[in-house]
Image (cartoon, helix red, strand yellow):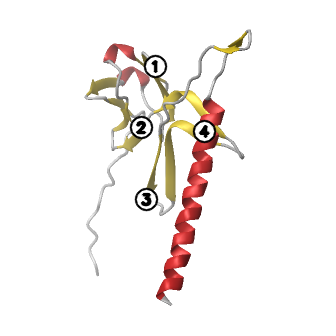
Amino acid sequence: MFESDFDEWIKRVRKLFEEMDKTFEEIFRETMIEEEKGGEVKRRVYGPYYYGFSVTVGPDGIPRIREWGNIKPGLGRIRVSDTIEPFTDVMEEEEVIKVIMDLPGVEKEDIDVEVSEEEVRVSAERGDRRYFKLVRLPAKVKPETAKAQYRNGVLTITIEKVEKKKKKKREKVKVE
């Protein structure tokens, strides 16, 4: 009985690695760029590839999956972009919204931040590293109050909300 379970597990692991091999072959095939001039291949470009995801459960109990990187799964094909979508977190506080973004390998002079009432657009480029992210905000903000800080590869943008949450007033009720 034990050998049968073990053999089944080995088959599943082999299948998983075969699927991973196919995926990586497809990535390399899709991203190889060949320039031919007179029958001669001028250059081939591979990678770099970045992909990650995070899973969180919101206050409503619904799981949310966020992907980041430059590899995007598509319908039967994998798309690889020159631009990396950075890992981003949006935190809504009582009076402000904070957008925190990982942008390693660039300097603060390379970062361009644009804020409107409903979204934040961030782009950065240094050498072969290019980042771009459009973040839809959970509440309306005052763009003129936006402040951005970049330290150790992490960009933090803080923006005041248009309407601040009012603290609910509690009244003491006498029980009769």
Mark 1–mark 4 distance (CA, rounded to whole Å): 19 Å
**Which of label 2 and label 1 is nearer to you?**
1
Give the numbered dot on residue 163.
2
Q: Quadrant of residue 129?
A: top left
Judge by depth and name the residue closer to the eye, 17 or 110. 17
Judge by depth and name the residue closer to the eye, 66 or 80. 80
Identify the residue at horizontal 35%, vertical 21% (top origin): 106
Identify the residue at horizontal 44%, vertical 31% (top origin): 141
For residue 78, above or below residue 176: above
Give the numbered dot on residue 128.
1
Mark 2–mark 4 distance (CA, rounded to whole Å): 46 Å
For residue 64, above or below residue 5: above
Q: Secondary structure at mark 4?
A: helix
Q: Which residue is mark 4?
A: 27
Q: Is residue 126 visible?
A: yes
Between discs 2 and 1, the one toward the N terminus: 1
Q: What percent of the width, then of the height, locates residue 80?
A: 59, 33
Residue 124 located left or right of residue 21: left
Q: Give, as a three-letter code, the residue at label 2.
A: Glu
Q: Quadrant of the C terminus?
A: bottom left
Q: Quadrant of residue 96?
A: top left
Q: Secondary structure at mark 3?
A: loop
Q: Which residue is mark 3?
A: 59
Q: Give, as a three-letter code, the residue at label 4.
A: Ile
Judge by depth and name the residue closer to the eye, 167 or 25. 25
Between discs 3 and 4, the one toward the N terminus: 4
Mark 2–mark 1 distance (CA, rounded to whole Å): 41 Å
